[in-house]
Structure formats: structure tokens, C-alpha cells
Image (cartoon, rainbow, N blue to C red):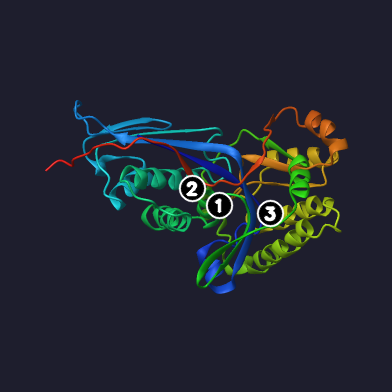
Amino acid sequence: MIITKTPFRMSFFGGGTDMECFFKENGGAVLSTTFDKYCYVTVRHLPRFFDYSTELSYSKRERVTNVDDIEHPAIRNAMKMLDMHELRLTYEADLPARSGLGTSSSFAVGMLNAFYALKGKYADKRKLADEAIYLERILCKENGGWQDQIAASYGGFNRINFGADGYEVLPVIISPERKEELNRNLLLFFTGFTRFSSEVQGINNVSSEDKKTQLLEMASLVDQAEHILTDNNTNLDEFGKLLDYSWKLKKQTGSKISTGHIDYYYKIGMEAGALGGKLLGAGGGGFLLFYVQPENQEQVRIALRELMYIPFKFENGGTRVIHYTPETYEPKD
């Protein structure tokens, strides 16, 4: 039996520039971190006592005798890609799916990590990220960028650069005290709305030529944000103000990025004392993140009491195997 633990991510700047059709020509960059909310994937070989050979448990339960009959596209394609058979797979998570935190990609990374471990093989972070991107974007034909798979695999607070040759992951080097201060100044709220990121990406078509100017500016904000974080002489509050500017810019890249409800809650948060914020993910719903100075946090939480407040801490681990019990498995003839 294998159990993997894979973090979710929050992206601060550069979202949309991680779309392959954009960065292959224009380059791109993202500033993001993983935090202490996780998905867990448990995998083992299913004993041969049943009239089905594979059992899957996620938001629904599937029992099939043929891998091609699996409804969940990521599981079906991943099992075929790695030649997996006769499995019992269970997925559970600390936060809901379709909420703007890269949950589907965290699942894809954690599942691939578990599959390799079940086969007695080691897959490094680069391999897991690359194969999760291939799984979701090529095999499953889902719209979206590359940042989620990379963040879930590597973990930590990173700048991810994108270009014609692919990507590179560069950890952001800041003092523990400054990083902790940033963590304390961020408040996360669940709006209660969920949507498929790939659908929003498809509708918005954020990489089209008429959005190029905005996306290039969004990529440039990564440089500014990284400077704020790494320069101890710069007031960290500038990070919050830059979030506000970036959010307003991102809303120009697609009609489905925000909604009336999201705009309403964002306005309330800002009026209550937040310096900036953004909707996490492709848009349309999910989690609102605010940068709020400590003295204003109580009034912001009161103003947004209709929403669920989610405490969190940054994490550095990325996906990992947290339980490993080898199995003796002989494939059927």
C-alpha cells in the first residue's frame, strides 16, 4: 500500500503566462507557493476476490473490469500511461476540488507519485511535474497552464520561469522572519463557488493576441514582487498593493475571470482595510486571498463573515510518499 501527500498551491503573480501557447513565443513567469492543505492518494493492488478488477473512490465510486471503462479521465489515462492494473485507489483532500488551488493537478502529481512507488520505482520532482503536465494537457486535453503541476511536485515558495525550452524552478530566498510576516498578513476566504479551471481557461482564451499586452505586464510584475520580498529595505506592504494592481489587470484578460459576487466581496474586503488581494486560480469562483496588516485583520474577517475563513501556513515539501508497504504482485497472464 502506498499513500502520497501532495500540497495545494496559491499563485500570487504571473498567472496566465504559464500557458504553453503564450510562453513558447513570449516567455512567462509565475510567483507561487504551496501551503499546508493537502490531497492524499492511497493506492494498492486490489485482491482478486471481486467481480471487478479496479475500484476507485473520489467524489464518486467506480468499479470496473476494464481500464478503458473508467470515467475519471486523469485516472484512466494515468493507468494506461504507466501500465497499471487491478488497483484500489482512494482520493481525499483538505479542501474542495474546482476551487482555484490547483487541486486537480495536485491529484495528478500525487497519483503518479503513488503509481511509481507501487511499481517500486522512484520518480524525481521534475519527472512527476513533466508527466502530470503531459497527462492533463495532452492525454486529457484539458485547457490550462503548467504552473500547478510544477508547484505541487516541487513545493515551496518559488519563481517559475517559462520559455521556449520549457521551465526552470527558482526558490525565492527570503529570511524566515520576512516569510513568516508575509504569511501572517495573508487571509484566505472560501467564496463557496466552484468551477472547472479548464473551462474558464477555454472561455477566456487568455493567451490570445489581444491579451498579449496585459499578460506581458503580468509577467513583469513577478520581477517587482520578487524584489519586494527579497529586499529587506522595502516595506512588505508593497506586496499587498501589487496584488491589488495585478488583480485589476487580470480581470482585463477575460470576461469569466470575476463575477458580481466576487467583485462584491473583494470590494468589502478592501473597504474593511485590506491593501490588496486576488481570486486564486483561473477565475469564476473559489478562494479569495487578501493582504491585510495585522491591525486591520479582525475588521476584515468581520466584514467577510459570510465567507469561510481558512487559516494556513506555507509549506516546503512538495509531493511525498508518507506510507510505503511493498506488495507482491503478479500480473495476470
- Name the residue at 84% across, 31% down: 299
Q: Position of residue 123 (x, y in %)?
A: 40, 53
- Name the residue at 50% across, 49% down: 199
Between 291 and 171, the one lying in front of the other is 171
Circle 2 residue: 105
Q: Position of residue 254 (x, y in %)?
A: 62, 56
Identify which amino acid the numbered label 1 is placed on.
Ala
Q: Earlier in the sequence, mark 2 or mark 3?
A: 2
Q: Which mark is residue 151?
A: 1
Image depth: mark 3 or mark 1 in front: 1
Query: Which quadrant of the rendered structure holds the N terminus?
Result: top left
Q: Earlier in the sequence, mark 3 or mark 1?
A: 1
Residue 240 visible in rendering: yes
Query: Which quadrant of the rendered structure holds the C terminus?
Result: top left
Query: Would you identify the image quadrant in which residue 76 lies?
Result: top left
Residue 73 visible in rendering: no
SS at mark 1? helix
Query: Would you identify the image quadrant in which residue 55 lies?
Result: top left
Instruction: Classify 10 Å Cα crowding around label 3: few (below 14), some (14-19), many (20 and above).
Output: some
Instruction: Classify 10 Å Cα crowding around label 2: few (below 14), some (14-19), many (20 and above).
Output: many
Q: Which mark is residue 251?
A: 3
Q: Which mark is residue 172?
A: none
Identify which amino acid the numbered label 2 is placed on.
Ser
Q: CA separation, marks 3 and 1?
A: 23 Å
Residue at the limit of the structure toward the left, as seen here: 333
Left or right of 158, for residue 96 = left
SS at mark 3? helix
SS at mark 2? helix
Residues under numbered marks 1 and 2 in contact, where contact means CB atoms less than 8 Å apart: yes
Identify which amino acid the numbered label 3 is placed on.
Lys
Left or right of 140, for residue 205 = right
Q: Position of residue 262 (x, y in %)?
A: 69, 41
